[in-house]
Amino acid sequence: MPTRICVLFGLLCLASLCCGSNKPGEVLLVIACPPHPQQARSDCLALSHNVLEQQRALELAGIFPEDFVLKVHVMHELFNSWTMLDALPHLRAQARVLGARTEWIIWCQHNTRVSSLRGLLEQLRRQNPRELAFYGHALYDAEATIIHHFSNYKDPQRFPYPMLSAGVVFTGALLRRLADLVAPSGQNITVHSDFSIDASHELARFIFDNVSPDPHISTPISGGILLKSASYICSTPTSVPNRKLPCLLHAQPEEPLTLGQRRNGCEHTTGSHIYFAIKTCAKFHKERIPIIERTWAADARNRRYYSDVADVGIPAIGTGIPNVQTGHCAKTMAILQLSLKDIGKQLDIRWLMLVDDDTLLSLHLIHTHLPTSVPRVSALLCRHNATELVYLGQRYGYRLHAPDGFNYHTGGAGIVLSLPLVRLIVQRCSCPSASAPDDMILGYCLQALGVPAIHVAGMHQARPQDYAGELLQLHAPLTFHKFWNTDPEHTYRRWLGGSMVNRSAPLAAHKEQPAAGPLHMTMGRHSLAAGVGLLQQTGLGKHLDL
């Protein structure tokens, strides 16, 4: 009797598998597409067309797998969907793009490349779509870092997280589970911070903390699901020579901009077109400013040091705002007002870059074998129209899962503003208090005014050792921040391509201006009251210097 039951059960399973094989599983390729700059949107469309062309070629050759149906979906980024967890509810809601029959989801960014669709589908056929799993190119922290909230500080090198730009493959079972967890009705989830800093690491951490390998257990007890390193997903197509398995998915490294490319749709930009407003205070005049003068100041003639007190020895311009330990909102607004007065009618100035006195910049030529390479800052700014409202930097998010969430550019990495936007900020934005977090208040105000926070991959709020080395190889670094526990001059030489100089470039002539007026500007119909209340409730009246 037991033997007959086993045989019958086996036949039923075989019949189930055969019936299932008559219904091809869906493979959903999602391209998360940012709205800016235009080149990124063009890359998204090119990736979509390339994948569909590969599919058509396989179908014409009669070799497209019959057990798969491919869908390509370009997901245009909403204000908060640069973080994948916040994008999932929108993906689930868009005409059920992520359906019950979706077996695999290939998550791409605009700079992801699919070198072989056929090879990728063959790899998926060898893996179990019913498993709660995700696959990617694994990155690891060299040491515990603030940008990852000091996660796994005891042994950070044992926690893998995916390189999103190389592509990530999810089983449908896992992504549907994640979509349910982050839905408005989701409950009992663990989120370690309201800040969104690194979408990749935060995704891996969320999965580990909230998804159990056992589908019958809602929350992992002793540890959840970890990223599976996939050898067919690479950081770059040539990252590992003599590979046994070819790279089927990989990130596209940033190409250096040449003079010919610059003329084609790029506005010529040099250091002379940028006004550098450097925020400092008296206690750092002798400690930090000499480092700037020995490094990037040689390429920034239009630079001004703004401090709580004037110092003719630097020279530093006094803002009239007493120094506070955290926040600096009133001081930053005063700097913007004074900068506009200083710029006056200088027609050459198109941009204002606001940086800290412990921010390192790269303003010189990219070191390549191309004799026509141009400065990194030019490669960044030439693709943006300085006559429009442009807000560039390293984008962070605050409470992006909530209706009151917003994006902002973190101050230490440097914030680049077009001059029309600086004028708008001075007219329409205000500080709730002198010590309110300046970068967050600025981001909240600009989001209310409809100005998007455009992310720049080469700008960094932390030190080089706080980022995976493979990420730094993808994009030529433009900025780093923080001098503590590091050698800033070595950082400048090693990562920003700079050579040390004995004397910086002379400062452009400065006309003494009166201190900034009272900071009681309003935002018209865009009141900051809600955002200020939110920041105060969460203790962010004190600046969280991430």
Image (tube, rainbow, N blue to C red):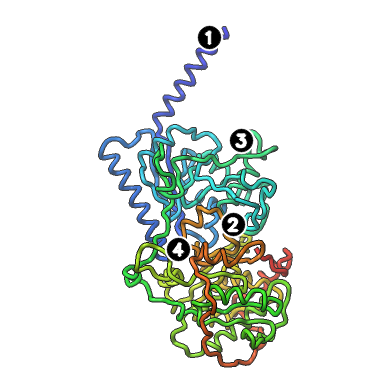
Which residue position is annotated with label 4?
35
Q: Earlier in the sequence, mark 3 or mark 4?
A: 4
Q: Is residue 114 visible?
A: yes
Q: Which one is earlier in the sequence, the residue at label 3 or at label 1?
A: 1
Q: Distance from label 4 to label 1 (Cα)?
A: 62 Å
Could you tell me the amino acid type at mark 1?
Arg
Q: Earlier in the sequence, mark 2 or mark 4?
A: 4
Q: Alpha-carbon neighbours of circle 2 within 10 Å: few (<14), some, or many (≥20)? A: some
Local crowd at mark 1 within 10 Å, few (<14), some, or many (≥20)? few
Image location (x, y in percent) of residue 119? 37, 38
Residue placed under numbered mark 2 in the picture: 465
Q: CA distance from mark 1 to mark 2?
A: 63 Å
Residue hosting label 3: 213
**Horizontal side, residue 305 vs residue 363: left or right:** right
- As measured in the structure, the alpha-carbon distance from the residue carrying label 3 to the one carrying label 1 is 33 Å
- Alpha-carbon span between mark 3 and mark 2: 32 Å
* Element marked by disc 4: loop
- In the displayed structure image, the side of residue 220 where residue 343 appears, left or right: left
Q: Is residue 120 visible?
A: no
Place of residue 544 in the rendered image (x, y in percent of width and height, measured from the top left): 68, 65
Mark 3 vs mark 2: which is more N-terminal? Answer: 3
Instruction: Name the secondary structure under disc 3.
Output: loop
The mark lying in front, picked from 1 and 2, is: 2
> 228 or 50, which is in the foreground?
228
Measuring 67% from the left and 73% from the top, which residue is drawn there? 529
Q: Amino acid at mark 4?
A: Pro
Q: Find numbered disc 1 in the image and state the secondary structure of the residue it sits on.
A: helix
Name the residue tied to disc 1: 4
| Alpha-carbon span between mark 3 and mark 4 | 36 Å
Question: Neighbour class for label 3 at 10 Å: few (<14), some, many (≥20)?
Answer: some
